[in-house]
Image (spheres, rainbow, N blue to C red):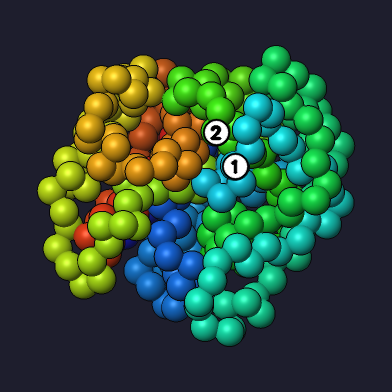
Amino acid sequence: MITATTLDALRARLIPSDRMPLVFLGHGSPMNALENTSYARAWSDLGQSLPRPKAILVVSAHWMTRGTTLVDVSAMPRTIHDFYGFPEPLYQMTYPAPGQPDLAREVVSLLASHKAAEDDTWGLDHGAWAVLKFLYPEADVPAFQVSIDMGRGLDYQLEIGRTLAELRDRGVLILGSGNVVHNLRAMRPGGAPMDFAVEFDTLVAERLEDRDFAALADRAGLGKLLDAAHPSVDHYMPALTIAGASDAGDDLTFMTDTIDLGSVSMRSFVFHAR
């Protein structure tokens, strides 16, 4: 978990930087948007440390497509409550941030080689708004989402990140929202972290520190450990986007590095220019 000391150090680095940082947040349960959790408090603290962006591009685990990469070009993205069986107050939450249609259409052009297309029907799913509400609680920064093409391999998502990286120099905050480990079948509320969850979470952290992103996208090399950590890789993909958008001039800071519910890693990380 991020501490006051590391947050102060991160704040000192982030605020003066012309180049926007890259943020990956382990969003976990939708209840984090409703309850005063340690994760929600860490996201709020992070939001106070980040430079104010001109716009936020979100890659969320909850917008999956196949055969194309869609970009939301709507002027006022709707708040999507894409979950079931939670308390009613969660369904009453809205995040009325404006979209950024002109920039979103530029992103479609930027990702033309990745079969990008415009979409005006999606909005902000809970992978986006449930963390944005803590980062920018006034909902006054334009935000839009880019989908994950689940028909392509892990390395493809690294390529997406590399292509989007130039937006960092135009005041755009690229935000990935998913989980480094996400196995809902193995969840044990109140249970100790499972061995495979700890092992995969540690492996990802080490590869990020080593900047060995190719290893993170090597499905064969990750083998059965990846299968255990991610029965479906949708929550893993946004972490690869953020890794792909980083470069050798970035420092890396981890936060909220705990395993929740036995099999969900809440690890978050920030790449920030030196």
Residue 83 in the image, given as x and y percentages of width and height: 55, 66
What secondary structure is marked by label 2? loop
Q: Is residue 35 above or below residue 137?
A: below
Q: Is residue 161 above or below residue 180?
A: above
Is residue 252 found left or right of 79 in the rendered image? Answer: left
Name the residue: 51% across, 31% down: 241
Name the residue: 14% across, 63% down: 192
Residue 150's disc number: 2
Quadrant where the N terminus is found in the figure: bottom left
Name the residue: 72% across, 35% down: 70
- Dot 2, crowdedness within 10 Å: few (<14), some or many (≥20)? many
Residue 90 in the image, given as x and y percentages of width and height: 57, 77
Q: Nearer the viewer, residue 16 or 136?
A: 136
Q: Is residue 182 above or below residue 39?
A: above
Is residue 225 found left or right of 67 in the rendered image? Answer: left
Name the residue: 41% across, 18% down: 248
Callout 1 touching callout 2 (CB < 8 Å)? yes
Residue 247 in the image, given as x and y percentages of width and height: 46, 20
List the residue tagged with mark 1: 64
Q: What amino acid type is highlighted by mark number 1?
A: Met
Q: What amino acid type is highlighted by mark number 2?
A: Met
User: Disc count in the image?
Assistant: 2
